[in-house]
Every structure is written in structure tokens, then in C-alpha cells.
Amino acid sequence: MNDEARGAFATRGVGLAGFDAPEARGLPPAATGVRVSSASDTVSRRALAHGQEQLRDGPVADACSALLRAAAGLRETDPAAARRALLAAASAAWSAGDHDSYRRVFAVGPCHLCGAGCASTPCARGCPEAAWRDHRIGMSAMAQGDFRRAIAVLEPRLHQVTPRAETDELCDAGSVALLLGRLPLARRLLSLALASARAAGAETAVPGIIAYLACAELREGRHAQARAHAEEGLVLARRLGQRNVAADLSAVRALVVSIAGDLPTVRAQVAEVLAVAQPHGLAQAAFLAEWAQARAELGAGKVERAAARLAPLVQPGARQGHFGLWFLAVPCFVEACVLSDRALDAPEMVDLFAVWADLGADPQAPAQLARCRALLAPADRSEELYRAALAHHERASGPYEHARTHLAFGMWLRRRRRPTEARDQLRAALVGFEHCGAVLWAERAGAELRAAGEVAGTGEAGPLSSLTPQQVRIARGVARGATNKEIAAELSISIRTVEYHLRNVFAQMGVRSRTGLAHLLANVDEDHGRGWELPDRG
């Protein structure tokens, strides 16, 4: 990590808050001193209602503009309503991926009551604006990437929130805890907010709270719970006509499903998200949906597609997926680059990701960073980095990410002819993937385990029974139409190794060509009712 990387990271933006960010705090510039007329007040309230409706089901850029106008008009006559408008405007700006508007909402000016001046100066003791201004100072620090100051200002107030607090206060506190990476606290506060909203009959608020809660569970590796909440929220959001909220929930669900390896289902869910996200300008939902599809493609061995899909999401430029979320997809991008021989695209992203990991807002990031560095490192450093990654995983919840590191390390050990050590890592990967429902990843770990010499047999019949597990996988890949390069990427071996094994396969099975092998295996699978192991790389 270096100063150049820190500067690049700050320029690109930061502000993760579950994935949405309605806890954003801020006020418009000081009022002119002219008393707002009742007619103007009515117009502002209409703008507030319209903006809130558009935020739930409409173009979010329009919602942001209406809400900022409402906040400016209501500041003098109804400060509480003005603050609600600013909260909603920040949420709209985040959903739209509008970095400039998001930062403007956070702007901290002089306090009009006690005169506190600069953006970092708290209000005088006893000022009614003190709590609000402190929150804005913390959120402004967060928007600038100063997480340590943000934590110092924001976190103490989270522990002052009691279970008897109002629904809005619980939800805001929970989303801030999510922003700061305090995931167990975030889940507790958001669960309380959900219970409070249901008890109060505030049905309209429930889908949004569920979206936050599902995000907290997803980030902590509680995939089954995240999916259950996302699907529950989807039913209600659709019934209430909250299409934007439904798109966010669909995107979370797609991220959960993406680790199961059901690529057709993920594609269908992504299409469902984009059908709303594109016309309504939902950059957040679109980013999560594209990331979900890329993650499913990576798990299915379609590494080149995954790298191509992730590149515009994480790299700087006009096509960047979202100013405050891009770093979440960097570990997948690095792995896809390495497996598809695009490693030159990855080192710069690892330096940027290191800045994010150093901020302390994501418990999984230090382990992911070490794994990324291990994937790119020379052989004499990789083992040290893999073991460092595993040590970081022991200090943070998340069985899926932990299992991915075990798998990568096990594959690395196997390629270096250290099968006993490889099997230990691969068994741990298999158990981890099974624990979180990552079906295709579990199959991949199991295949690697057999290739490392696990005593379980190949389970194959007829001509295949004489082949090693690695040869079976190569033979099935060829029969499905995959090229040697594609098979090498899928199995994380060299093309030369694929060619070597394939010559032996031809000799043992008595065929002379790829076409002959495909015909032979088609007959074997017709007799035994089995499908190909390798996915269609299309």
C-alpha cells in the first residue's frame, strides 16, 4: 500500500452502508433569513411526498432532486421534516451512484444556533443541534475515507440506542453499524427495528429494513438467513408496489444464489433486477446484480467471462459500477484475472483494495487481501500469504470466504506436489462450502480433493474407471467441447499439463481424436445416466 494508492482510493469514493445508505446526514446551506410562506411550505411538503414515492418506485435521480428541494424549503418551518428529506435524498444519491450529490448532502456548514464554524468543529455544549452536527461530522469523515475519525464520532452513540427506541432510530443506528463493519451489532439493531416496525403496523417501512438486515447477514456470511429475509422482503415489496426496494432485495438474493452455482437461476434473477434498475437509474442494484452473475460465472469455471464482467465494475472510469461499492468485487476480479491469464490487470486493484482493508470497516477484507496477494505472488511468497489469510479468517466470521482461501491454498499445494498438505486444505474447503450451501464450489473442492489422491475412487464406470480423477475431468471437458486453454483455466493447471494428460487419455481409451473421445463418452453417459462434470464454457 502506498500514498498513490491512498490518493486514488479517496478520489474514487467510499461510503459502504450495508449497500444502501439512508443514514446519510447533512443540511443544505444556511437559510436566507426570509420566513417561508405557507404556500411555499405546502409546495415543499408535496416535493417531500413525491420524492419519497419516487425513491420507492421511480427514477432515483428525480427523487434526489425533489428531496433536496423539499429539505431546503422546510428547513425554517419544520427542521425535523427537512432532516427526513435529507436522509431520503442521501439514500437516492447512493442508489443512483451519484457521488457528487451524496457528498453535498454530507456537507457540514456553520451551526445556525451556536455558530460552530468549520466542518470538524462540534457544537457548543447544550446546543440542540449537537447530536445532529456530530452525526454529520462523522458521516462527512466517512465520505472522505477517514474511517478512524468516523468511528470515533459515530460508534459511541450506537451503544446508547436501547431496544425501546423508535423504529427510525433503530434502523438508522443499525445501518451506521453496518457502515462501520460492526456486523453483530448491526444485525441486533436492525432486528429490533424490524420487530418495532411490525409491532407498530408500519408495513411500508418493513421491506427497506429487511433489505438492510439481509445485507448485514450476507456480509457476515449468513447466506441462508440472508436469502430467507430477501425472499420475505420481496413478497411484501412487490405487493406494496416498491419496485426499487424489490430490485435491491432481488440483487441480494442473486448474490446468495450465486455461490450455489445455479448459473441459469442467477441469470434470470439478474435480468429481473436490471429490468427495473436500468430505467430507474439504480446503480447500486445493477452493481450487485452484475457482481452476482460474475461470481456465479467464476464458480462455474467461466473465468474469462467473469473477468470481463467485473473489469468495468471495479476499474476507474465512466462505466464504474458504483462509487461506494466497487471494492467489494475486487477479490473476485483478482481471482478471475489470475485464472484467465489477465494477471496484469490485477496488481493495481490489489493496492487499492489494501487501502479499503486498512480502513477497518470490513472484517473479511484483511483475509481477502492476503489471498489476493498470494494469488499474484511468486512461489516463494505465496505460502506465507495463504497462511496469513487463514489466520485473518480465524478472527472474522464468514465460512464462504474462508473456504475459498482453503481451496486456493489447497490447489496451490497440489500443483507443487504436496498432496498430503493439499488434502488438509481441500477437506476444510469442502466442509466450509457445504456449510454455507455453495454447491458448485463444494463439487469443485471435492474434485480437487480426489485429484490430490483422496481415497474415495472416481466413482466412474466402464472405460473411465482406468483414469485418474484429473484425467476424467479433462476427458469430460474435451467431450463437452472445451478447449485445452479453457480446461487449464478451470483446473488451474498449465495447457502443457492438459496436453500431457490428454495424450494418456487417448492411449488408455483407444481413441485418436477429440471427436472420438466425445462419441465414446456420450455412449458411457447414456448408459449410466451421468452429465458432464465441466460446465459449458460457451
Image (cartoon, rainbow, N blue to C red):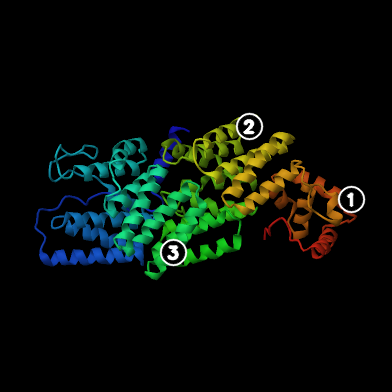
Q: Secondary structure at mark 1?
A: helix
Determine whether, in the image, residue 410 is placed left or right of residue 60. Answer: right
Task: Compute the Cα span from label 3 to label 1.
Answer: 55 Å
Kindly identify which residue carries mark 2: 383
Res 201 → quadrant: bottom left
Q: Of the two numbered discs 3 and 2 on the same chain, state the one appearing first in sequence.
A: 3
Q: Of the two numbered discs 1 and 2 on the same chain, state the one appearing first in sequence.
A: 2
> Residue 248 placed where, x, y %?
43, 59
Classify 517 as above or below 152. below
Task: Compute the Cα span from label 1 to label 2.
Answer: 36 Å
> Residue 261 placed where, x, y %?
61, 56
Residue 316 seen from this side: no
Kindly identify which residue carries mark 1: 507
Kindly identify which residue carries mark 3: 234
Badge 1: residue crowd in 10 Å (few <14, some 14–19, many ≥20): few
Q: Secondary structure at mark 3?
A: helix
Q: Residue at 83% of width from left, 54% of height from top?
A: 464
Q: Residue at 38% of width from left, 47% of height from top?
A: 188
Badge 3: residue crowd in 10 Å (few <14, some 14–19, many ≥20): many
Q: Secondary structure at mark 2?
A: helix
| Mark 3 vs mark 1: in front | 3
Residue type indicated by callout 1:
Ala
In this view, the residue in front, 241 or 536, is 241
Determine whether, in the image, residue 136 is placed left or right of residue 478. Answer: left
> Residue 329 placed where, x, y %?
51, 48
| Mark 3 vs mark 2: in front | 3
Badge 2: residue crowd in 10 Å (few <14, some 14–19, many ≥20): some
Task: Compute the Cα span from label 3 to label 2.
Answer: 43 Å
Residue type indicated by callout 3:
Leu
Q: Residue at 24% of width from left, 37% of height from top?
A: 120
